Amino acid sequence: MSRLFSLVLSAAYLVAALLLGSGEDALMVLGFVLVSLACIWFGDELGDFTGWTDEGRITARTPGGMVRFVGWLLLLLPAAAFAIQHLRAG
């Protein structure tokens, strides 16, 4: 259910970007939702990563639930910002 809801929300963001913006906007939104979806769908696998990155060495695993939580936080942030903006305007 989590994957389906995240996919539907991501598709809504992409449709909104295409209807209200440009193709370039849609590509930026696509990149954003792909990172969020990866965290939600593959939280355990991403959390198990240890090793070298451009920023240094990751020495400990991250709990998969925490990775999924951050993915949901990222994915819901635009919807929350939109809701807050319209509540304040109305």
Image: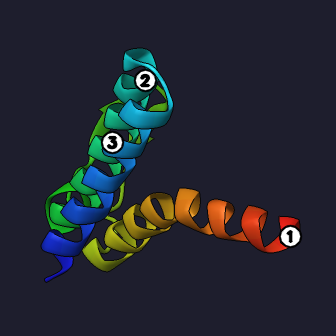
32, above or below 74, in the image: above
Tag shown at residue 54 = 2
According to the picture, the residue beneath numbered tag 1 turns out to be 88
Q: Nearer the viewer, mark 1 or mark 2?
A: 1
Q: Name the amino acid type tagged 3.
A: Leu
Residue 54 horizontal/vertical position (percent): 43, 23
**Residue that appears at 65% across and 69% down:** 83
Q: For mark 2, give the secondary structure.
A: loop
26, above or below 82, in the image: above
Q: Which quadrant holds residue 7?
A: bottom left
46, above or below 64, in the image: above
Q: For mark 3, give the secondary structure.
A: helix
Q: Name the amino acid type tagged 1.
A: Arg
Residue 37 horizontal/vertical position (percent): 25, 55
Q: Earlier in the sequence, mark 1 or mark 3?
A: 3
Q: Earlier in the sequence, mark 3 or mark 2?
A: 3
Lateral position of residue 14 relative to residue 79, left or right: left
Tell me the quarter of the image containing the N terminus.
Answer: bottom left
Distance, label 3 to label 2, CA atoms, is: 30 Å
Q: Earlier in the sequence, mark 1 or mark 2?
A: 2
Tag shown at residue 14 = 3
Residue 68 horizontal/vertical position (percent): 32, 70
Distance, label 1 to label 2, CA atoms, is: 40 Å
